[in-house]
Amino acid sequence: MISSMKRLTRSLLAAILIGLSTAVHVTPLLLVAVVKMIFRTGTVRRWCDRWLMRIAENWIGFNSWMIDHLTDTRIEVEGMPDSSREGHLLVLCNHQSWVDIPVLQKLFNRRLPLLRFFLKSQLIWVPLLGLAWWALDFPFMKRYSKQMLARRPELAGRDVEATRKACAKFRDIPVAIMNFVEGTRFRPDRHQAQQSPYRHLLKPRSGGIAFVFDALGDSIDTIVDVTIAYPGFDRSPPGLPDLFANRITEIRVSIRTLQVPDFFRDLDYQNDPADRQRFQAWVNGLWRQKDETCERLLAASEIDP
């Protein structure tokens, strides 16, 4: 009973603090974003970009403080990359839970350029957060189902063009583009429905990575490969309420820094079948290694699965 009350109190306190922090940080974000939109000169835009980054880093820093002080969760990390807040990076990660996002932000805040995620277009309507993501230039993507494309063939290719436009604005600022390659969070039913060949992962979707390279070309400097595992939850990953209710004892993260393969530079994923096959083979090989890493991370924990 006492344990349940403690968890409820932690969760309520976290919810209140998250709400207050969101309101406090979104307001100045929007003000700076409006200034950036009105004054399009290079000097003003650079000033606005710097302030947007500082506000976002402070927001993430507060969320990370909550993880440190409102939970007993241990985050074990191997292979943390050197600190570099310049350049253009592509961060690839398996997607286990919504907890992945605050964990990745905590690990990379003020170490790498601000992580930017590809978001579904509907998420722009999320109260306050949608406006914050817009202010920080998070790319909003509209995906079309096969049924929709069959009814309206003229929509084919618009998602690719939208990716190009979204990434084009990153050419002049440091950025770490975050890609959850599976496209959705791991769930046992999804894993079974896919007949995934990987024990701990869903099948990767290589198109999103290819779109980024198509849009940014040779400006991507480095690939940061992240594998995240939740011992004790490996077949049914936890949610954010589990984090702040203090149910997650340990999170294990493995990070590798990879060179961009040379053939990525002239990649024609959309039109060249040979390029597409070679690229997919590279992604599948990465995913086999990642599955082995998940197995090792879980085996290294003392928590029973």
Image (cartoon, rainbow, N blue to C red):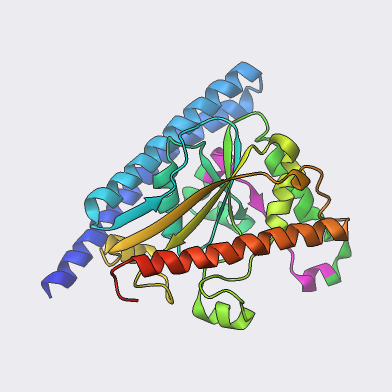
Q: Residue furthest left?
A: 2
Task: Give the image quarter of residue 254.
Answer: bottom left
Q: Is residue 251 left or right of residue 164?
A: left
Q: Position of residue 184 (x, y in %)?
A: 57, 66
Q: In the rendered structure, which segment of residues is drawn in magenta?
A: 133-149
In terms of depth relative to the viewer, which is nearer, 192 or 40?
192
Q: Is residue 192 left or right of residue 2?
A: right
Residue at (40% x, 45% y) in the render: 107
Q: Is residue 132 left or right of residue 302?
A: right
Residue at (43% x, 35% y) in the render: 110
Asked if residue 238 can be seen in this view, the reply is: no
In terms of depth relative to the viewer, which is nearer, 169 or 151?
169
Q: Position of residue 77 (x, y in %)?
A: 38, 51
Residue at (55% x, 28% y) in the render: 49
Residue at (24% x, 56% y) in the render: 71
Establish if 34 lies above or below 275: above
